[in-house]
Image (spheres, rainbow, N blue to C red):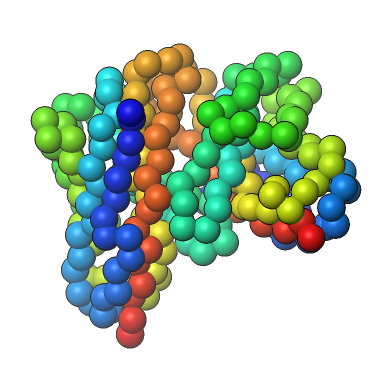
Amino acid sequence: EADIYQTPRYLVIGTGKKITLECSQTMGHDKMYWYQQDPGMELHLIHYSYGVNSTEKGDLSSESTVSRIRTEHFPLTLESARPSHTSQYLCASSESGPTITDTQYFGPGTRLTVL
Amino acid sequence: KNQVEQSPQSLIILEGKNCTLQCNYTVSPFSNLRWYKQDTGRGPVSLTIMTFSENTKSNGRYTATLDADTKQSSLHITASQLSDSASYICVVSDRGSTLGRLYFGRGTQLTVWP
């Protein structure tokens, strides 16, 4: 099992609230990712980071924002949660170096429900 | 359009039986193909990874095959166990960017009954 952690595991919150999903890894990986996954659907990349102070938007447009102040920490923030944000959010990390066989290690996910 | 299609969408088998899951992709250029196992409520865990030159890769009771010419892959599970119940996701990586972009299938939901 990979050393990548997400908190909280489950979150139920009302519309309009600000939330931060935490992700941390102890493997020293430079690359980190956030994915969004709905039941029975594929993972969609919403944010990624090559390293400290580097963040990029992914393929799926998201109203969330991310920051990468420390190598091991990659939090995701929603300023004003809406029911459409209800989903599972998965954080992952991978080593630097050749990308041809980079394996991404995933955290357990945060199941977010916005009422 | 780069896509990854998996079949069947769901599968139920009895404990001890074998099964084969399919993955067809149109991703080009092609770098590598991975199979992940995702338990309910958990993040995916890598099972195998194959590059263009590899035809088969095994990991215990899991054996993946790759035909890069027909752009097809399969994951064969031998002597299934209850713990094999999970979603199996096929992921294809291209060489089109520094990131090595990943294309995810929707997964095959496997249920193993006692």
In the depicted view, which residue is nearer to us: A113 or B73?
A113
Residue B29 visible to the viewer = yes
The residue lying at 57 percent from left, 61 percent from top is: B41
Identify the image quadrant of the C terminus of chain B.
bottom left
- Horizontal and vertical percent for residue B85? 39, 69
Number of numbered discs overlaid on the protein picture: 0
Residue A32 visible to the viewer = no
Splitting the image into 4 quarters, where does residue A19 fall? top right
Identify the image quadrant of the N terminus of chain B.
top left
Q: Is residue B17 above or below residue A13?
A: below
- Horizontal and vertical percent for residue A40? 46, 57
Q: Is residue A102 above or below residue A108?
A: above
Q: Is residue B12 left or right of residue A89?
A: left
The residue lying at 29 percent from left, 29 percent from top is: B27
Q: Is residue A11 left or right of residue A46?
A: right
Splitting the image into 4 quarters, where does residue A51 fall? top right
- Horizontal and vertical percent for residue B88? 36, 55
Quick one: which residue is furthest to the right in this view? A17
The residue lying at 84 percent from left, 38 percent from top is: A79
Q: Is residue A6 left or right of residue B109?
A: right
Splitting the image into 4 quarters, where does residue B94 fall? top left
- Horizontal and vertical percent for residue A77? 78, 37
The residue lying at 55 percent from left, 49 percent from top is: A37
